[in-house]
Image (spheres, helix red, strand yellow):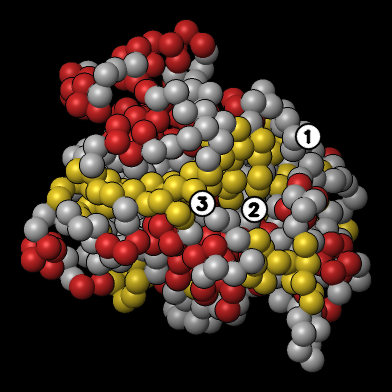
Amino acid sequence: MSDFTRAEACAVAIAETFRGDGEILVSPIGTLPAIGARLAKLTFEPDLLLTDGVAFLTANVQPVGGARGPEPIIEGWMPYRSVFDVLWSGRRHVMMGATQVDRFGNQNIACIGDPKKPKVQLLGMRGAPGNTLNHPTSYWVPNHSRRSFVEKVDVVSGVGYDRAAALGEAASRFHEIRRVVSNLGVFDFETPDHSMRVVSVHRDVRLEDVVESTGFELVIADDLCETRAPSDEELKLMREVLDPDGIGSKEVKV
Amino acid sequence: MTEREVVAELRDGMTLGIGGWGSRRKPMSLVREILRSPVKDLTLVSYGGPDVGLLCASGKVRKVVYGFVSLDSIPLEPHFRNARQTGAIEAVEFDEGMLQWGLYAAASRLPFLPTRAGLGSDVMRLNPGLKLVRSPYADGEELVAMPALTLDVALIHMNRADEAGNGQFLGPDPFFDDLFCMAARRRFMSCEKVVPTQDLLKQGSIHTLKINRMMVDGVIEAPGGAHFTQCPPDYERDEDFQREYVASAGDPESWKTFKARYLELASEKEYQEAVKRR
């Protein structure tokens, strides 16, 4: 097997979050999520629906960052209004960023500090409240630290498992935080109380580093392993087709 | 109509809906005209971009109703951030789908529309006035009652229009401009080019005629009117200018320079000339 970078390991871990999704719309926010989703479509999830980042569904896969690729084959039209319609129908899996994420998968992209007069204003709620209650949501955090993996988020944009449970069965029946992928490892919520669990660490990362960089107590999976290495085919696809300019590596902190 | 005639209809304290999305197809020539006017204390409803940033930085805004404010290629809007971080404006923050629901409720003359979005998130904490509603059917599900976002005035920008107020988008996404118009009492549409009605279908297919004349009270021909936001296929975003705009938020001196060069000008014509000259 060829050598690979941390960014490439992350992209494969991101692709894995879409395994089994089938014929649904995938909305990856960010460069590595875009690479990961397109990699999944090119390999084990060919039925995924992907947009070109604007309003067209493309049947073939384009490179990220405007690199030259095949002529796009447009298979459908997906303006924002249609995205909302799909979102509410549940046939979607989004991977968003998270400035803060907590033990139960609550996510904050709105602001840091008191929302009345924030210390740092971020994007706003965006679609996080609706996404998390309507279809699977995953998060990509390229800078895993005690500032991003926090005991309690300042503002809840995306709803985590504790709050979803408090809403009761009716309101939470479509809620699923599938996975969190960071620059250090891969995390899920498959524990009795749905608190975050580390399931794999990337190559050259020690479990102690992950624990030390996390602001709450992580559950450690019994079968904790190293994140799956990219296959030669995956590396070739990423380097030659999906990201020939290597911009994905700029997004990840090693 | 002219930009000046539109802005003459605005009053202090009005609620203004602005079409487009982020830094895309925003009615910027109308926004710039507001900056030249004495109008103040506005409430903005927007899928926010530099429209929100410029109006906040110029002290025109009391309250912003939004799901996000972003410049797209530059994720965070620096002037909006300044306004938030100094507590200069009141923020009313919703999920972006809730914003659509609020406009749709207003457009449909309904007091609210139910949605699952918002439940369990801090949208509820930050908007203590938001109420829940229980389904009257057997499921009994409890949902958010997203209230109608009724607008005093809507401003949108289209690629083409005729003089009667039929509007046409030629880019990939119509955004929510039709809903902004339908949610508003007075509606104004700027466009890149006014064409005879019989020429509209020479520009694009029937599906691009998203805005019709009963949704519009006035048309303003404003070539380059969305600058520096994108308005495809007429033009892409002016990324250099957007970077210059972002840099102007760095300190009061930079903002003063930016204002003097681009905003404290007598008209949109002079703005367009200043943009060309740089």
Residue that appears at 91% across and 71% down: A192
Q: Secondary structure beneath disc 1?
A: loop
**Chain letter, disc 1 residue:** A
Q: For the residues carrying marks 1 and 3, which lies nearer the camera in this image?
A: 3
The numbered dot on residue B151 is: 3
Q: For the residues carrying marks 2 and 3, which lies nearer the camera in this image?
A: 3
The numbered dot on residue A7 is: none
Camera-side residue of A239 and B176: B176
Judge left or right: residue A98 versus residue B105. Answer: right
Asked if the residue at tag 1 contacts the one at tag 2, i.e. Cβ–Cβ closer than 8 Å, the answer is no
Instruction: Give the Cα separation between the discs numbered 1 and 3.
Output: 29 Å
Image x and y of residue A21, in percent: 57, 78
Task: Tell me which numbered mark, 2 or 3, is placed earlier along the sequence.
Answer: 2
Q: Is residue A161 above or below residue A249?
A: below
Camera-side residue of B265 and A102: B265
Q: Secondary structure beneath disc 3?
A: strand
**Chain letter, disc 2 residue:** B
Q: Amino acid at mark 3?
A: Leu
Asked if the residue at tag 3 contacts the one at tag 1, i.e. Cβ–Cβ closer than 8 Å, the answer is no
**Chain letter, disc 3 residue:** B
Q: Secondary structure beneath disc 2?
A: loop
Q: Which residue is labeled 2 in the image?
A: B94
Q: Residue furthest top?
A: B253
Image x and y of residue A94, in percent: 58, 64
Q: Amino acid at mark 1?
A: Asp
Q: Which residue is labeled 1 in the image?
A: A114
Instruction: Give the Cα separation between the discs numbered 2 and 3.
Output: 16 Å
